[in-house]
Amino acid sequence: MAPVNRVFAAQLVGLPVFGPDGESIGKVRDLVTGLRLDQQPPRVLGLVVELATRRRVFVPMLRVTSIEPNAVTLATGSVNMRQFHQRPNEVLVLGQLTDAHASLRETGVRVTVVDAAMEPTRTRDWVLARLAVRERSGRLGIGKRRSSLQVLPWSDVSGLGLTDLTGQPQGAGQLLMLFDTMRAVDVAATVRDLPTKRKLEVADSMDDERLADVLEELPEDDQKELLAHLAEERAADILEAMNPDDAADLLAELAPAEQNRLLDLMEPEESEPVRRLLAYSSDTAGGLMTPEPVVLTPDATIAEALAHIRNADLPAALATMVFVCRPPTATPTGRYVGCAHFQRLLREPPAELIATAVDTDLPALRPGAPLAEVTRYFAAYNLACGPVVDEQDHLLGAVTVDDVLDHLLPEGWRETGLHDVTNNQEVERA
């Protein structure tokens, strides 16, 4: 097979990375380059690779033996397995260079960088030899077309120095297009690694629903940073789009005055369940629960229950159980009758009433139950989801196993990944 002589950065995103023996390492998330002071193409220092544990590590280009359309292969040798941290003189090609504003050297025409292509040199280095750019213009009017894409040598484009990229405002259109194919947790990992300026630009460009999904996957410090950057009206909209339990967790980290201000800006029907959650300690069943589980009345059919848990927007853990209550079905509900496990629903005739499949023997959690008790409860009954019921037999919400794990894992696990591998030889970025 002929060697690859040009690879566009956008084509690398998401490619699987394999070791020399074919073992799966992770996926490519970005390229790291060191910009130069002259007009020569900058050298590509390495890849940002996301491991299966969500940790992102730096892999030097010298460790890359082949780049194919469907995979990247590494050579033998030790690689630094510590969490990737960008250095002051480094630039993330997709995270920072994409969407940057620049100019053509000869004509001064303003352009936007859409992509960058790296090419190998005789010394086995890779350089960002070419840029895919599109001419910048005002808003497109009726009948006007977008300017055509040009692929130009790096030296033909100016305005891409380190100070330019860290000082000038830039859009995020191309980066958001890449995010479209990624899960929220993967987008959050990418956003977390961006410099603050770029992180805020991405947040400004995301729609509310997508930003809410990404915020739920970010560490608390990043959540607070982004929320503080947004105008209060938009911050309230984002909180409304988040799951109530995640919104409550975030608001609990804010000063009381700011917390109340944002709650007052939210729609009453959206803020009311969040206020109820804030009344409980975060390490209790009440603080862990979501107030929006699947709740049906006893006269609902099995078919109705299955239709509810098939909802693609319903988290997987919540889809494992349907709660049966007397009206009203909004939490806090009428009298709690019991729960129906989804495996049981699959075995019953669709026309049967859900009341025939209700498990009335499973104990319910009380809202004040501490985390240790909640953990034992999930382990004892092998559950992914469990009911939280008050002393008057009203269903208040449901705790899911992912929320329990989130509180059991060490603080900061989102930043460091699940395993802290420190016994590997570190390969410095030259």
Image: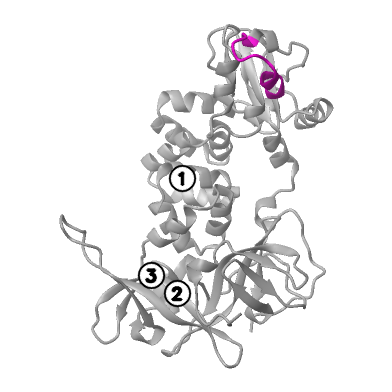
Residue pictured at 25% horizontal, 68% vertical: 147
- Residue to which mark 1 is pinned: 210
Where residue 215 appears, as percent x and y from the top left, is 53, 46
Q: Amino acid at mark 2?
A: Ala
Structural crowding at the residue carrying mark 1, measured as other residues with C-alpha within 10 Å and reported as few (<14), some (14–19) or many (≥20): some
Is 122 displayed left or right of 366 in the figure? left
- Closer to the camera: disc 2 or disc 1? 2
| Quarter occupied by the C terminus | bottom right
Q: Secondary structure at mark 2?
A: strand
Q: Is residue 106 magenta?
A: no
Looking at the image, do the residues carrying marks 3 and 2 touch, with CB atoms under 8 Å apart?
no
Q: In this rendering, does residue 394 appear at all? A: no
Q: Amino acid at mark 3?
A: Ala
Q: Amino acid at mark 1?
A: Arg
Is 222 displayed left or right of 262 in the figure? right
Looking at the image, do the residues carrying marks 2 and 1 touch, with CB atoms under 8 Å apart?
no
Above or below, comparing residue 250 to residue 196 in the picture: above
Q: Secondary structure at mark 3?
A: loop
Q: Secondary structure at mark 1?
A: helix
Name which quarter of the figure residue 280 lies in. top right
Q: Which residues are magenta?
A: 342-354
| Quarter occupied by the N terminus | bottom right
User: Sequence-wise, which precedes: disc 3 or disc 1?
Assistant: 3
Q: Which mark is residue 90?
A: none
Residue pictured at 62% horizontal, 9% vertical: 352
- Residue to which mark 3 is pinned: 100
User: Sequence-wise, which precedes: disc 3 or disc 2?
Assistant: 3
Q: How many marks?
A: 3
